[in-house]
Image (cartoon, rainbow, N blue to C red):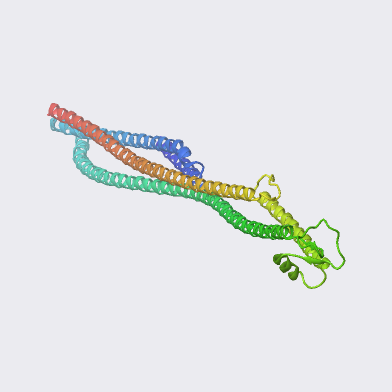
Amino acid sequence: MLITSFKEQGKGKRFLSILWRQMLCFSLLGMEGNIMSIPCTTMLLTWAEARLAAKRAARAEARDIRMRELERQQKELEEKSEKSHSEIFSRPSSRNSISATPLSGNSSRRGSGDASILVDPDASLSELRDSLAEVEEKYKKAMVSNAQLDNEKNNLVYQVDTLKDVIEEKEEQIAEFYRENEEKSKELERQKHTCNVLQHKLDELKEGLRQRDELIEENQRMQENIDSITKEVFDLQETINWKDKKIGKHGLVIIPDGTPNGDVNHESVVGAITVVSQEAAQVLESAGEGPLDIRLRKLAGEKEELLSQVRKLKMQLEEERQKYSKSDGMNPDIIGLENGSDLQLIELQRDANRQISEYKFKLSKAEQDITTLEQNIGRLEGQVARYKNAAENAEKVEDELKAEKRKLQRELRTALDKIEEMEMTNSHLMKRLEKMKANRTALLSQQ
């Protein structure tokens, strides 16, 4: 039975080592440590308890066998001692029989044999006593050495259990470090993704601000161009109107000879004189020298040139307005500048100012949205940090509870072993006490 139990213990140790290696591989491969570690740990604990129970059973069986062997030896010694005592008590009767029949030769020979027999039991009794004392001394030494070896074995088993607990704690710490590394890596990836998203939003906002600035600058340039073109158009129109008024106001009048009252209904006289006003004379002088017809043609040509220039400027103004309406998304419903173009320019300027104010409002709203999102991100990050701290504290408490549980289980196993050993020792002492009482009663009854 002892050999089979030792073989079973060896198989159990090999199976436990294989299971321990598989557990270590699972924990290192990162197969969901929190989920897989619980059933594997329970399996390991159950197997360890079964192995400990097998060890206890084997130890108890060995003690029973040893106790039976000691009892058998003690019974043999008691039987030998009883035989020796019986021989001692029967020795006087044999001496009396020898003294009563000393006559014949046969009786003399029998008497010599009986004397030798009487001498031999004393020697055998002394030898038995010496051997009994030697056996008892050896038994005491063996029991002391056995107790020392048992204590050393218990100490070594306790050290092995302690080292196993340390190894388990280290492996749990390694698994925890791997899990924290994975969590930190995932958190880093999330932070990188968030940073990339925020960077993309920042680039978009910068691009929007740049486009807004470009639109504002282009609007200002176009407004300046429109103002300059409008001013030139107004100047040209004023010049044309002024010349038209001057020509209409200071017309040419032919005064004939003999008509001092200036009546123009009379027939013209050859050699008539052309009478003009002083301002008209200044205009004709500015037209250059030559006949009056040539000067008038020059003035008419200048007028046509000015009108064509005005038309060109109007066309340019219309083109600029169309470009401005396309760039700002305006409806091209502005009609070319006419005599009353001031109202249209004012409306155009109002529309541009309204669009600029709308863009500014949208920009401020976007900035407010960005600040709100940043505040939400900060609040969420704070919540995540709090949750992580709470989870870490819970894991620490769980680890402490696991360590305390292992410690209590180890103390419980040690206490159970001590209780079992004390019970075995108590039973052994009770048996020895009963046997000593029985021997004492037997000796008293024989005496």
Q: Toward which corner of the image does residue 122 lie, by quadrant?
A: top left
Q: Quadrant of the N terminus?
A: top left
At 77% from the left and 59% from the top, the residue drawn is 308
Q: Toward which corner of the image does residue 61 lie, by quadrant?
A: top left
Q: Give 101 or 384, whichever is nearer the viewer.
A: 384
Q: Give 401 or 111, whichever is nearer the viewer.
A: 401
Determine the residue located farthest toward the right in the rendered image: 270
x, y (%) of residue 7? 45, 39
x, y (%) of residue 199? 54, 53
Q: Give 324 or 49, whichever is nearer the viewer.
A: 324
| Observer able to see residue 216 | yes
Determine the residue located farthest toward the front in the rendered image: 258
At 54% from the left and 46% from the top, the residue drawn is 362
x, y (%) of residue 313? 72, 58
Q: Is residue 45 above or below residue 311?
A: above
Q: Is residue 124 above or below residue 189?
A: above
| Observer able to see residue 76 | no
> On the rendered structure, is 400 left or right of 317?
left
> On the rendered structure, is 72 left or right of 45?
left
Q: Quadrant of the C terminus?
A: top left
Q: Is residue 393 above or below residue 268?
A: above
> On the rendered structure, is 390 left or right of 281?
left
Q: Is residue 402 above or below residue 219?
A: above
Q: Toward which corner of the image does residue 269 lie, by quadrant?
A: bottom right
> On the rendered structure, is 194 left or right of 271?
left
Determine the residue located farthest toward the bottom in the rendered image: 289
x, y (%) of residue 392? 39, 44
Total marks shown come to 0
